[in-house]
């Protein structure tokens, strides 16, 4: 078994191999991460300990994160099918007004993508974007970038989106979800501003086929075509109710409340139960809309979508467990006292590398969080980096999210959704989507670093 500096060098080589395997050799992230985990375990752990370590990392991740990811994805699917997402978008348009369609579409994306994957969110809201372009004459490219930026921001920063909520649990913040949500909203502000300003700047410089699309439907035609839409309150409920329940639980925990009511509130506020309540509301909306017959099909579609994410997330948990048991973190802590100065930038860089290498933000978030470990565990990378408080852990979730949006390019399905549905050429996608996500990611990590400096 290797130890010390030799083990650290092997660890760095394993990370490089993992990145090359995913990006260059096109090996599925699950196999790449599991393969690297096994190789690292073979050189760092006794043979008898390897099966148990791998099993514990895999099952532990599934038991804590799997159901949360599935529930969040199902809520998103049902919001899309029932038209609740369109109702929420309509509410934002009415509040912001037609004079600022780019701000309206930015905020629409930010709200809708809290439970909905950003890819699906763009497809859902794209007809509304085109209708607003036709009505106001604003740059179609600017609107596409603004919509993409809004969707992407909540996708990587705000629970109960699967990525951020999985990261929060991996770092040990299940009882501090209100903190994560609050910090996520705070970090969203400068990122949304950056996305908006970038969209305003790049819009006139890029042509979209949607600029002169006479066939685009009007806003009124869209609503009429969909049929009877659910009300505003019931449309927002699957998002707002879980957030409120998790927030109440956090308050109860911080206040140290006891008794039957406190126990009930804590139960309802755990992510799994809170999201289940949100899911039940969205299922009720589905049946009320007369689409209950599609319940089985929608469930199947959800599981097909989240299956790969679940397995890659579990693989990240395996790698994190191997790193923890191998003593790599202990060696780094003992021999690199200045490592804590890297602090919040370390998870950002790891997530950015994984994002750019394999394309999926959710995979980058969950894998990086699995590697970082619990903020309260002495043998974790979080401890080695000096990120040992709930606030530091919440900022780490944000740093991971910032890295996971840096950058979206050709290996990212979202890149092609934005370019194809936005009427942009592939080369224009690099000028818009790729460059915008770079700007947003850098703005995010700088803002996160500044917060970290003053806490």
Image: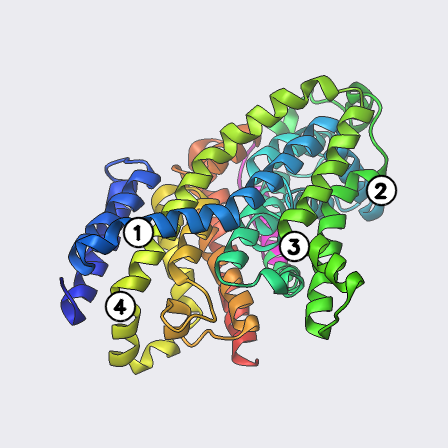
Residue where numbered disc 2 is placed: 233
Mark 3 vs mark 1: give the one in front. Answer: 1
Q: Earlier in the sequence, mark 2 or mark 3?
A: 2
Q: Residue at x 67, y 23 (%)?
A: 295
Question: Quick check: 311 left or right of 80?
Answer: left
Crowding around mark 2 (Cα neighbors within 10 Å: few <14, some 14 to 19, many 20+) is few
Residue where numbered disc 1 is placed: 52
The reply to whether dot 4 and dot 3 touch (C-beta < 8 Å) is no
- Viewer-side residue, 144 vs 151: 151
Q: Disc 3 versus disc 1: distance between alpha carbons?
A: 28 Å
The reply to whether dot 2 and dot 4 touch (C-beta < 8 Å) is no
Question: Quick check: 364 left or right of 68?
Answer: left
Residue 211: x percent and y percent?
A: 63, 30
Residue where numbered disc 4 is placed: 327
Vertical relation: 129 (above or below) 199: above
User: Which label number is shown at residue 343?
Assistant: none
Residue where numbered disc 3 is placed: 270
Q: Earlier in the sequence, mark 3 or mark 1?
A: 1
Mark 2 vs mark 3: give the one in front. Answer: 3
Question: Quick check: 5 left or right of 253?
Answer: left
Crowding around mark 4 (Cα neighbors within 10 Å: few <14, some 14 to 19, many 20+) is some
Q: Disc 2 versus disc 1: distance between alpha carbons?
A: 48 Å
Q: Disc 2 versus disc 3: distance between alpha carbons?
A: 23 Å
Give, as a single range, the part of the protein colored magenta.
192-208
């Amino acid at each position: 078994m290797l130890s010390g500096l030799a083990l650290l060098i092997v660890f760095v080589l394993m990370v490089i191999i993992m990145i090359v395997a995913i990006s260059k050799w096109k090996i599925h992230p699950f196999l790449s991460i599991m393969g690297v985990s096994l190789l690292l375990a073979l050189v760092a752990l006794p043979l008898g300990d390897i099966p148990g370590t791998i099993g514990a990392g895999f099952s532990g991740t599934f038991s804590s994160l799997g159901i949360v990811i599935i529930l969040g994805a199902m809520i998103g699917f049902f919001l899309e099918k029932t038209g609740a997402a369109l109702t929420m978008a309509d509410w934002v348009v009415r509040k912001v007004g037609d004079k600022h369609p780019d701000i309206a579409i930015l905020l629409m994306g930010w709200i809708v993508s809290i439970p909905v994957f950003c890819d699906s969110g763009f497809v859902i809201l794209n007809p509304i974007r085109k209708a607003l372009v036709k009505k106001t004459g604003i740059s179609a490219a600017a609107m596409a970038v603004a919509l993409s930026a809004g969707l992407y921001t909540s996708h990587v920063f705000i629970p109960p989106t699967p990525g951020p909520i999985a990261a929060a649990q991996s770092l040990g913040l299940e009882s501090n979800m209100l903190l994560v949500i609050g910090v996520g909203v705070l970090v969203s502000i400068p990122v949304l501003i950056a996305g908006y300003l970038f969209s305003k700047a790049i819009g006139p410089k890029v042509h979209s086929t949607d600029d002169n699309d006479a066939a685009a439907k009007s806003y009124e035609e869209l609503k009429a075509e969909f049929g009877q839409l659910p009300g505003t309150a019931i449309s927002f409920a699957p998002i707002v109710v879980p957030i409120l329940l998790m927030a109440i639980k956090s308050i109860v925990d911080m206040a140290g409340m006891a008794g039957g009511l406190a126990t009930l509130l804590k139960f309802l506020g755990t992510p799994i139960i809170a999201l289940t309540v949100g899911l039940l509301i969205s299922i009720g909306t589905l049946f009320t809309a007369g689409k209950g017959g599609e319940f089985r099909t929608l469930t199947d579609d959800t599981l097909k979508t989240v299956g790969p994410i679940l397995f890659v997330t579990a693989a990240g948990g395996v790698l994190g467990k191997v790193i923890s048991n191998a003593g790599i973190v202990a060696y780094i802590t003992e021999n690199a006292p200045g490592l804590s100065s890297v602090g919040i930038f370390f998870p950002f860089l790891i997530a950015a590398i994984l994002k750019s290498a394999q394309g999926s933000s959710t995979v980058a978030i969950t894998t990086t969080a699995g590697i970082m470990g619990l903020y309260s565990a002495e043998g974790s990378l979080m401890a080695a980096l000096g990120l040992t408080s709930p606030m530091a852990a919440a900022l780490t979730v944000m740093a991971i999210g910032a890295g996971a949006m840096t950058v979206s390019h050709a290996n990212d399905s979202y890149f092609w959704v934005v370019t194809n549905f936005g009427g942009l050429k592939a080369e224009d996608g690099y000028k818009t989507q790729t460059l915008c996500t770079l700007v947003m990611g850098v703005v995010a990590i700088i803002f996160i670093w500044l917060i970290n400096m003053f806490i």
